[in-house]
Amino acid sequence: MTTTKAAGASGPRIYPNVDAVVTALRPSYPVFCVRAGRLTARARTFIEGFPGTVLYAVKCNPHPFVLRTLYKAGIHNFDSASLPEIALVSELFEEPGLFFHHPIKSRAAIQSAYRVYGVRHYTIDHWKELEKIREEIRRVEGIDEPPIIHVRVATPPSGASYELSRKFGATREDAIKLLDKVHEYGFECGISFHVGSQCVDPEAWRRGFEVVRDVLAGTQAKPRWINCGGGFPAHYGGQEPPPLDVFLDIIKEEWARLDLGPDAHLLCEPGRGMVADSVSLLVRVMLRKGDRLYLNDGVFGSLSEIRDANLTPPVRLIKRDGSPKSETMQEFTFYGPTCDSLDMLPSRFMLPDDVEEGDWIDIGQIGAYSNAVSSDFNGFRAETFVLVE
């Protein structure tokens, strides 16, 4: 993480706000502005309000500062989708809780996760994946602790920005067969579901638990682990989800209805809902053509999810000379810095009509799937992170 230090200070400088970042750095490059206090508060809200163990979905934002801040706040368990994510978390923390919850994994990743990093939790949604895990773990000598297998079930459409059950999740009938086979193999088992990313409907979790109850009624296994996934939404233009407490209250009700006994465990794995509002992205206007603004970051960098999910994050103009902004607002289209016509955002953004080359724009709600999915296309990449209050 690139940060600046105050004179005589031992740690990274913490700026009072984004305007202070502009005054101090006058950056010609994109800058991620991280609010550690907000991230910490969000983590504690999940920990205090969720009736089980909160995992963080590493894929959402794997930056070491984000991970360390969450760990310090009390998030000590991590939903990892790949071996590199498992390695990253293992290098940062001593004995973190590791869950390999991608339903499809390579044999090499399974064996290394089990043998090198001691991962015990694995998710599947197909019998071939179960056999793969069983075969690879049997190859590992000297480790007697068996894996815990979570069977992921598909859920009904929820209106989420990303309907993950289009790609992952077993049907009720297949899930029952999988659980029975896991039980036959002598492995501890669980059931997981994911209602989809950026799901603004709290009732989707209720429907997910209904699927779980239906599967439990048909299996001979005794699952002790239930994972209700992520999907907790952030606030974007045109999307105003209910408060997080509404989602958590429904989960509490449904967990109580399952009544699996004192030895059962409930998991969730928020990503976007944990980190989205803790980071903004400071970009600079390279050129204005009428209502077109050409910025120094775009869809091949940190803004791809804005295009893919058709999101409209909040934006704020900062004038290059510190002068007052026009009170007249205008719609603009944002274009990225690459030499590619795909590098543009479909949403229109409202800004003062006097925006010009050299001004900065602070794009909010950018903590999720921004730096995590950026590329080096055309040599552009946002790499600078600073801390703001």
Image (cartoon, helix red, strand yellow):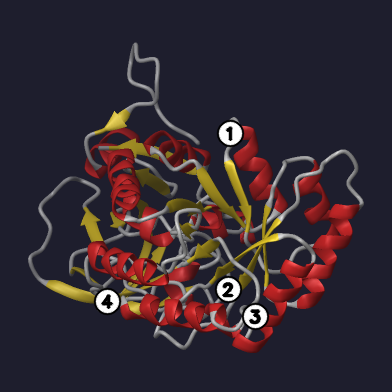
**Between marks 2 and 4, how big is the CA–CA gap?**
29 Å
**Between marks 4 and 3, how big is the CA–CA gap?**
33 Å
Q: Secondary structure at mark 4?
A: loop
Quarter assignment of residue 167 = bottom right
Quarter assignment of residue 107 = bottom right
Which residue is found at the position 50% from the left and 53% from the top?
263
Q: Which residue is disc 3 drawn over?
A: 175
**Between marks 1 and 3, how big is the CA–CA gap?**
35 Å
**Could you tell which of marks 2 and 3 lies nearer the N-terminus?**
3
**Nearer to us in this view, 233 or 357:** 233
* In front: label 2 or label 4: 4
**Could you tell which of marks 1 and 2 lies nearer the N-terminus?**
1
Left or right of residue 187, residue 349 in this image: left
Q: Secondary structure at mark 3?
A: helix
Task: Return the mark for residue 92.
Answer: 1
Q: Disc 2 marks which amino acid?
A: Asp
Task: Return the mark for residue 358.
Answer: none
Residue 65 vs 139, above or below: the answer is above
**Nearer to us in this view, 267 or 323:** 267
**Could you tell which of marks 1 and 3 lies nearer the N-terminus?**
1
Q: Are marks 1 and 3 in contact (CB under 8 Å)?
A: no
> Whole-percent x and y of residue 158?
41, 84
Task: Return the mark for residue 340.
Answer: 2
The residue carrying pointer 1 sits among few (fewer than 14), some (14 to 19) or many (20 or more) residues within 10 Å by Cα, namely few
* In front: label 1 or label 2: 1
Q: Disc 4 marks which amino acid?
A: Gln
Quarter assignment of residue 239 = bottom left
